[in-house]
Amino acid sequence: MENAPVSGHGSTTHASPAENAKNIEVARAGALALWSLSRSNRNKHAMQRAGVIPLLAKLLKSSNETMLIPVGGIIEECATDVKFQINFLF
């Protein structure tokens, strides 16, 4: 997900529109999986240690609307954890 273009067209490689669409769909699938995993406190802590917060902030700026729902879902699930709340603020 981290290397997928946020806007859907900002890739550093010269990928075709079909490749960009596929990359976005893979990133969306990853976000949906993380949303599901974020229901567990253990997984929330693992996601935090992996550095997911800056990536979620970047994805929130996406012009691709299909990314916003799963990213918002991840944030909503993780916001129940005090450690995440502190990291979201700073």
Image: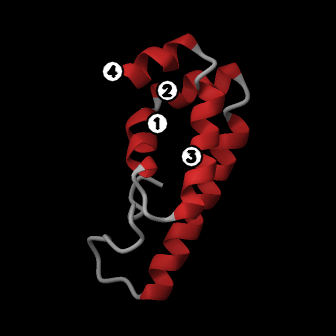
Q: Quick check: 2 left or right of 84?
A: left
Percent x, y of residue 55: 41, 43
**Can residue 8 be seen in this snapshot?**
yes
Q: Nearer the viewer, residue 88 or 37?
A: 88
Instruction: Find residue 52 and name its label.
Output: 1
First in residue order: circle 2 vs circle 4: 2
Residue 42 placement: quadrant:
top right
Q: Residue at x 43, y 33 (%)?
A: 53
First in residue order: circle 1 vs circle 4: 1
Residue position marked by numbered label 3 in the rendering: 71
Instruction: Find residue 90 and name its label.
Output: 4
Percent x, y of residue 15: 37, 83
Q: CA distance from mark 1 to mark 4?
A: 14 Å
First in residue order: circle 1 vs circle 3: 1
Q: CA distance from mark 2 to mark 1?
A: 6 Å
Q: CA distance from mark 4 to mark 3?
A: 18 Å
Mark 3: amino acid = Val
Mark 4: amino acid = Phe
Percent x, y of residue 88: 42, 25
Label 2 with label 4: CB-CB less than 8 Å:
no
First in residue order: circle 4 vs circle 3: 3
Q: CA distance from mark 1 to mark 3?
A: 11 Å
Residue position marked by numbered label 2 in the rendering: 48
Mark 1: amino acid = Val
Mark 2: amino acid = Gln
Percent x, y of residue 31: 60, 50
Q: Quick check: 82 left or right of 33?
A: left
Q: Residue at x 55, y 53 (%)?
A: 68
Scheme by which the image is coloured: secondary structure
